[in-house]
Amino acid sequence: MAPKYKFTYFNARGRGELVRLIFAAAGVEYEDVRFDWEQWLAFKAKGTTPMGQIPVLEVDGRMMCQSLAIARYVARETGLCGTTSWEEAQADMFVCGADDLLTNLITVRFEKDEAKKEEGKRDLATYVPNFLANYEKLCGTEGYLVGTSLTYADLAFFNVMHDILKVTSLDKYPKLAKVVEHVTADRGVATWLAKRPDTPS
Amino acid sequence: MPTYKLTCFNVRGRAELIRLLFAAGEIPYEDVRIEWDKWPELKPISDTPMGQIPTLEVDGQVICQSMAIARFVAGKAGLLGKTNMDQARADMLLDGGMDVGKLFTEMVMEKDASKKAEKKKEFGEKHLPPFLALYEGFAGDNGHFVGDSLTWSDIGFFNMMDFITAEYPGALDGYCKLNKVIDNVKSNPGVAKWLKERPVTNH
């Protein structure tokens, strides 16, 4: 019998969207629970989360946290993590690198101190082009970051580029442009992108 | 048999978990250490994927990102966890440890002496005790975080506490299960040998 998945996070992309994209690409059903702040506080007070944080994934009565651990678990279960141990390591490398950038973006976005926020934005102005240049250099030749088919590395790259793609063209990065094409053309992802809630972050 | 070459600074830092995993798996590798002052001249001409070290070279192919490398070596050493769910649990516990480890590192690297003293007090009183209490709950009576045998989450916890107890010596007092985890890791033959032989560095 197929496992029942329940994924709980805020009503945001943030640190939850990669997992949602993996479920979408894999065509796997799951319950997509979204909390507002009050609902989160009530849930947290129950003391059932492993580390007092969301996102959490519940599967067959067990609960786990840590967004990348969840993403990797779902990618492994659904065959989207690479086909050899070396491909898995490469996918891992790309996902970790994308997560570093995501952390930077989230930190700057939610920074309350104006001076620190401006400094963060200046740092991103060199970080992002370096990131894109590195990923273009490392990207596979078939329009996927790793190997010859979609992995969660492609989804992680697409996910972190959400706001960046609004202001930056991938003309200088033809291999990465192809990755984005493949991700958005994937049937499950395309369906999800058309119907997912539109949230500011 | 593949050849492994790990390149990092001459510190424990982000590479030590990887070195401990090679040791636990009794997997031979080349442990290349670069002195800090040599890095600027190497960086522009180096082959690193993302301009950072550590990197792992396997039969001529290179990856970076310390946790991706560690996960790969843990896999080769048979220390990831037996089922996919076990592996996910190990990942979760390691990532949770790194969230706290990051705060610890920020404190250690603080250059301003009075800010550092403040951060040290805050870490020791506000962040470390709840983390240890939480992880005491995660550890099994058998002194393992996942299942009934050594996994890389035990080794990762040991490595992190190795750094933390240097600044907070009594931190693990009273945590029976966590101390068992530490003992299990230290008594692994490959790890024991490495702990005796490894270069002594400040970080």
Image: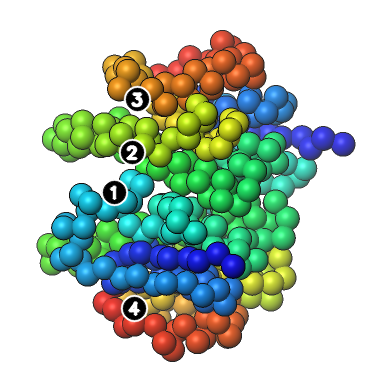
- Classify residue A113 as left or right of residue A3: left
Amino acid beneath label 2: Asn
The subunit carrying tag 2 is: A
Cα gap from disc 4 to disc 2, whole angstroms: 36 Å
> Residue B133: x, y in percent?
52, 66
From the image, tell me which residue sits under label 2: A134
From the image, tell me which residue sits under label 3: A173
Please report contact status of discs 3 and 1: CB closer than 8 Å, yes or no: no
Looking at the rendered structure, whether the residues under marks 4 and 2 are on a common chain is answered as no
Cα gap from disc 1 to disc 4, whole angstroms: 30 Å
From the image, tell me which residue sits under label 1: B51
Cα gap from disc 3 to disc 2, whole angstroms: 10 Å
Amino acid beneath label 3: Tyr
Q: Quadrant of the C terminus of chain B?
A: bottom left
Pointer 3 or 2: first along the chain: 2
Looking at the rendered structure, whether the residues under marks 4 and 3 are on a common chain is answered as no
From the image, tell me which residue sits under label 4: B166
Cα gap from disc 4 to disc 3, whole angstroms: 46 Å
Foreground mark, 1 or 4, reads: 1
Amino acid beneath label 1: Gly
**Which residue is at 32% across, 18% downward?**
A171
Foreground mark, 4 or 2, reads: 2
- Classify residue B192 as left or right of residue A174: right
Question: Residue B55, can we see it?
Answer: yes
